[in-house]
Image: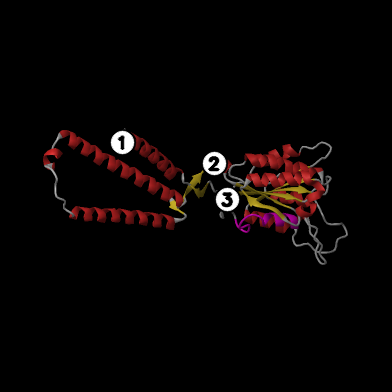
C-alpha cells in the first residue's frame, strides 16, 4: 500500500509523537512533587478491593489509549489516500468511451443515440465517457455519470434549440473537414492519446460516411490511413453506426476492421440502434501496454482497510466507555 498524500501522514504522526512526549514530560513533573500524606495510605492500598480497582483502572486506561491511538492512526492513513492495485478479469478492465456524433443534433438518429447512453451511463461502474461533435468537445471524458446523463438527455430532447451549443458552425477558407478529421478529434479526447493506456479505449461514431461535397477541393487534415495508425498507436477501437446508404462506407469500414471494431447501418424505418449499441458494448476493447502486454490491474485509491479499522476501533471505544460508566 502506497500513500498519495504522504505529507499528511507525516504531519499527523508527528503531532501524535509530540502529544505523547508532552504527556510523558508532564507526568514526570507531577512525580517530582511530593505531597504530605493525610492518612496511612499504605495500609489502604494493600486492601484486595483497592488492588482490584487499581488493576481495572490501569486496564481501562491501556485499552482506551490503545483504541484512541488506533482510531487516530487509521484516520491519518485514510486521509493520506492509500492506493493499491486492483486486479480484475480482462472483461472488467476500466473502459474509456468517447461518443463521436457526426450527425446533426436535430436528427432522429442522434436523439436515439444520446437517449440510449443517457440511460446506459447510469449503470456504469469503472467506465469514463465523453461526447464529441465535429467542432466541439461537448462532454470531456468523465466518471460523473449524473452530469453525463443530464447532458446527453438535454441534447437528445433539445433538437435544434441547442444545435449551436452542440456543434458550432465553423467555416474555413483553405480547409474542409472530413470524417477522418472528426474521428481524429474524437480520439484526442482520451488522456495521453498518443500512447496506449491501462484502460480500454473505444470510439463509437454515429453519422454519415462522408461529410465532404463531391466537388470539394480544399484539403482535409487527415486520411483514413493516418487515422488507423493513430488508433493503433493509442490502442483505440473504432466502432461505427453509419447513417449513409450502403456503398459509400469503404473508408469507414476499413478503419473499423483495422481497429477490431464493429460496423452497422442505421435504418430510420426499422431502427435497430439500441441492439447495435448493445452489441458494441458486449465486445469492449482490451487495455494494453507497448509490446502487446495486457493490463489486468490498475492503481486506485484503497482506503477500505484503514477505514474499517477506524470504525471497529471507534465502536469498541464506545462500548468500553459505556461499560466503565456502569
Q: Nearer the viewer, residue 102 or 178?
A: 102
Horizontally, residue 307 falls left or right of residue 19, namely right
Which residues are the magenta region? 181-195
Q: Is residue 51 above or below residue 73?
A: above
Picture residue at 14% right of the left edge, 47% below the top: 37
Q: Nearer the viewer, residue 35 or 286?
A: 35
Horizontally, residue 321 falls left or right of residue 308, namely left
Picture residue at 41% right of the left edge, 43% below the top: 310
From mark 3 to mark 1, how far is it between C-alphas? 58 Å
What numbered label is drawn on residue 89?
Answer: 2
Would you name the residue on which mark 3 appears? 288
Q: Give the secondary structure at mark 3.
A: loop
Q: Is residue 286 above or below residue 321?
A: below
Specify how the rendered protein is coloured.
secondary structure
From mark 3 to mark 2, how far is it between C-alphas? 13 Å
Would you name the residue on which mark 1 appears? 324
Residue 78: x, y in percent? 44, 48
> Is residue 186 a member of the stretch shown in magenta?
yes
- Bin the neighbour count of mark 3 within 10 Å (Cα to Cα): few under 14, some 14-19, many 20 and up: some
Q: Give the secondary structure at mark 2.
A: loop
Q: Nearer the viewer, mark 3 or mark 1?
A: 1
Picture residue at 14% right of the left edge, 35% below the top: 47
Between discs 1 and 2, the one toward the N terminus? 2
Amino acid at each position: 500500500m502506497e500513500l498519495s498524500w504522504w505529507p499528511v501522514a507525516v504531519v499527523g504522526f508527528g503531532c501524535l509523537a509530540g502529544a505523547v512526549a508532552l504527556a510523558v514530560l508532564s507526568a514526570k513533573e507531577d512525580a517530582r512533587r511530593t505531597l504530605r500524606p493525610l492518612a496511612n495510605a499504605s495500609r489502604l492500598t494493600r486492601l484486595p478491593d483497592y488492588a482490584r480497582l487499581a488493576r481495572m483502572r490501569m486496564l481501562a486506561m491501556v485499552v482506551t489509549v490503545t483504541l484512541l491511538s488506533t482510531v487516530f492512526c487509521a484516520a491519518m492513513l485514510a486521509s493520506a489516500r492509500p492506493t493499491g492495485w486492483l486486479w480484475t478479469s480482462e472483461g472488467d478492465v476500466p473502459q474509456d468511451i468517447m461518443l463521436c456524433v457526426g450527425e446533426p443534433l436535430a436528427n432522429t438518429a442522434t436523439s436515439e443515440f444520446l437517449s440510449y447512453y443517457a440511460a446506459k451511463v447510469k449503470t456504469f461502474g469503472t467506465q469514463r465517457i465523453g461526447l464529441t461533435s465535429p467542432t466541439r468537445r461537448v462532454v470531456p471524458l468523465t466518471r460523473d455519470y449524473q452530469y453525463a446523463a443530464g447532458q446527453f438527455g438535454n441534447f437528445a430532447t433539445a433538437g435544434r434549440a441547442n444545435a449551436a451549443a452542440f456543434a458550432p458552425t465553423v467555416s474555413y477558407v483553405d480547409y474542409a473537414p472530413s470524417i477522418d478529421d472528426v474521428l481524429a478529434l474524437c480520439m484526442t479526447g482520451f488522456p495521453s492519446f498518443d500512447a496506449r493506456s491501462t484502460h480500454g479505449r473505444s470510439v463509437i461514431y454515429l453519422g454519415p460516411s462522408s461529410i465532404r461535397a463531391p466537388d470539394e477541393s480544399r484539403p482535409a487534415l487527415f486520411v483514413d490511413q493516418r487515422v488507423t495508425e493513430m488508433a493503433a498507436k493509442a490502442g483505440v477501437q473504432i466502432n461505427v453506426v453509419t447513417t449513409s446508404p450502403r456503398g459509400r462506407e469503404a473508408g469507414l469500414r476499413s478503419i473499423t476492421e483495422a481497429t477490431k471494431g464493429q460496423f452497422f447501418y442505421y435504418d430510420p424505418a426499422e431502427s435497430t440502434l439500441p441492439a447495435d449499441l448493445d452489441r458494441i458494448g458486449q465486445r469492449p476493447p482490451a487495455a494494453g501496454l507497448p509490446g502487446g502486454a495486457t493490463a489486468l490491474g490498475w492503481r486506485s485509491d484503497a482506503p477500505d482497510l484503514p477505514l474499517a479499522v477506524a470504525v471497529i476501533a471507534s465502536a469498541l471505544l464506545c462500548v468500553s466507555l459505556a461499560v466503565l460508566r456502569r
